[in-house]
């Protein structure tokens, strides 16, 4: 049995998509649905959404989650964290280590397949120090340092180079290549709590399972794209869609609906929304999505941004999702009730040949 604990929804969906490559269907649920979703031989993915919570609530949520899933004695318990270490990474790992009675935690946040690496204790995005990228503008966890220990605000965290010995406490792997990831995955042991991003999870699965071929689905209409990311690439994409739109409808002070073609729509955030907090903006956007689903008869929705996706699911009362297809890395299609939902991390590229509103 495999159980993943993710701190945001797109991270949960990304790993569900990776599991599909190996013939594993891991349903995604919230903390309250653990008992009804994880009581099977395969396992599940629990989204705590802790990255969007206040710290004390996030740690309580983590404790509740780890306590609940320990009864199933999973063969692999994996803590999905952000690949650039946003969130309460160290604090949540310490909770996990205590509850699992582990003396060490081994963390591999790097995703070399996406150009996200760590060298000499510095995190890079496509060769650029992370503090010099769009991640410095994150509304809740701005990354203003590139040194891993400073990002984590903990000088006791060990940076482990390839072929080095892993010590007790929390160790973060310095990874530059896929080979580094594979080597680390082949040398994990039971005394460690394991955490990381998508590439490390992939490498861990590859040690026990064989990958399978899958076919891409035909997406349904009416289709709604929810643009909930603040990354520059996302903003530029919206400007292009507005330029080519057949209609643009202002909804209120914060949102507009862009009709890109027949039965295809984009819900976008207007510029200059500084008068509203990020949390309130997400909630307001989720309520608008619920209205559009009803008014436009939406059958398929793609949501950009993990916190945005979590708010939409909460407002729409969706607690459990079944992954059906990995359209691309991090772009995972799921089914819930009468709706197909695809989610995408805000910082990941959008393959317009697959998703084109």
Image (tube, grey):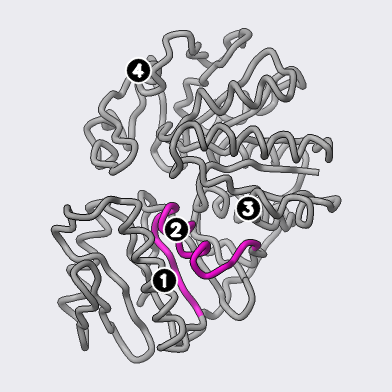
Q: Secondary structure at mark 4?
A: helix
- Binning the other alpha carbons within 10 Å of mark 2 as few (below 14), some (14 to 19) or many (20 upward) gives many
- Residue at 38%, 89% (x, y): give it: 263
Q: Secondary structure at mark 2?
A: strand
- Binning the other alpha carbons within 10 Å of mark 1 as few (below 14), some (14 to 19) or many (20 upward) gives some
- Spot occupied by residue 245 in the image (x, y as percentages of width and height): 21, 82
Q: Residue 209, labelled with which disc?
A: none
Q: Residue 344, labelled with which disc?
A: 2
Please indicate whether residue 32 sits to the left or right of residue 304 in the image: right
- Residue at 67%, 39% (x, y): give it: 65
Instruction: Determine which residue is flagged by label 1.
Output: 355
Q: Quadrant of residue 66?
A: top right
Q: Residue 30, labelled with which disc?
A: 3
Please indicate whether residue 42 sits to the left or right of residue 10 in the image: right
Whether tag 2 and tag 4 are in contact, CB under 8 A, the answer is no
Q: Quadrant of residue 267?
A: bottom left
CA gap, disc 3 to disc 1?
A: 27 Å
Q: Residue 150, labelled with which disc?
A: 4
- Asked if 119 appears above or below 43 in the picture, the reply is above
Residue range corresponding to the magenta coloring:
300-320
- Asked if 89 appears above or below 29 in the picture, the reply is above
Q: Secondary structure at mark 1?
A: loop
- Spot occupied by residue 2 in the image (x, y as percentages of width and height): 75, 43
Which circle, 1 or 2, is nearer the viewer?
2
- Residue at 34%, 36% (x, y): give it: 141
């Amino acid at each position: 049995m495999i159980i993943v604990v993710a701190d945001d929804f797109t991270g949960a969906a990304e790993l569900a998509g990776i599991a599909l490559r190996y013939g594993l269907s891991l349903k995604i649920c919230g903390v309250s649905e653990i008992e009804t979703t994880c009581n099977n031989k395969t396992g599940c993915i629990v989204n705590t959404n802790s990255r969007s919570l206040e710290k004390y609530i996030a740690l309580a949520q983590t404790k509740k989650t780890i306590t609940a899933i320990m009864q199933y004695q999973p063969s692999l318990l994996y803590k999905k964290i952000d690949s650039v270490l946003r969130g309460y990474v160290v604090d949540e790992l310490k909770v996990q280590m205590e509850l699992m009675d582990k003396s060490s935690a081994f963390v591999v946040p790097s995703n070399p397949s996406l150009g996200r690496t760590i060298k000499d204790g510095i995190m890079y995005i496509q060769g650029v120090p992370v503090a010099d990228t769009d991640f410095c503008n994150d509304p809740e966890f701005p990354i203003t340092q590139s040194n891993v220990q400073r990002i984590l605000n903990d000088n006791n965290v060990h940076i482990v180079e390839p072929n080095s010995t892993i010590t007790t406490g929390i160790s973060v792997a310095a990874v530059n290549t896929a080979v580094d990831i594979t080597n680390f995955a082949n040398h994990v042991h039971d005394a460690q709590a394991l955490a990381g991003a998508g590439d490390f999870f992939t490498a861990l699965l590859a040690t026990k399972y064989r990958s399978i071929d899958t076919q891409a689905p035909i997406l349904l209409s009416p289709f709604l794209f929810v643009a909930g990311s603040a990354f520059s690439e996302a903003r530029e994409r919206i400007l292009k869609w507005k330029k080519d739109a057949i209609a643009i409808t202002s909804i209120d002070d914060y949102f507009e609906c862009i009709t890109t073609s027949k039965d295809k729509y984009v819900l976008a955030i207007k510029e200059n929304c500084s008068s509203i907090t990020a949390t309130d903006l997400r909630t307001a956007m989720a309520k608008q999505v619920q209205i559009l689903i009803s008014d436009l008869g939406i059958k398929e929705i793609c949501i950009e941004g993990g916190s945005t996706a979590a708010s939409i699911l909460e407002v729409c009362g969706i607690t459990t999702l079944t992954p059906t297809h990995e359209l691309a890395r991090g772009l995972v299609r799921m089914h819930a009730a009468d709706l197909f939902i695809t989610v995408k991390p805000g910082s990941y590229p959008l393959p317009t040949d697959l998703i084109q509103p």
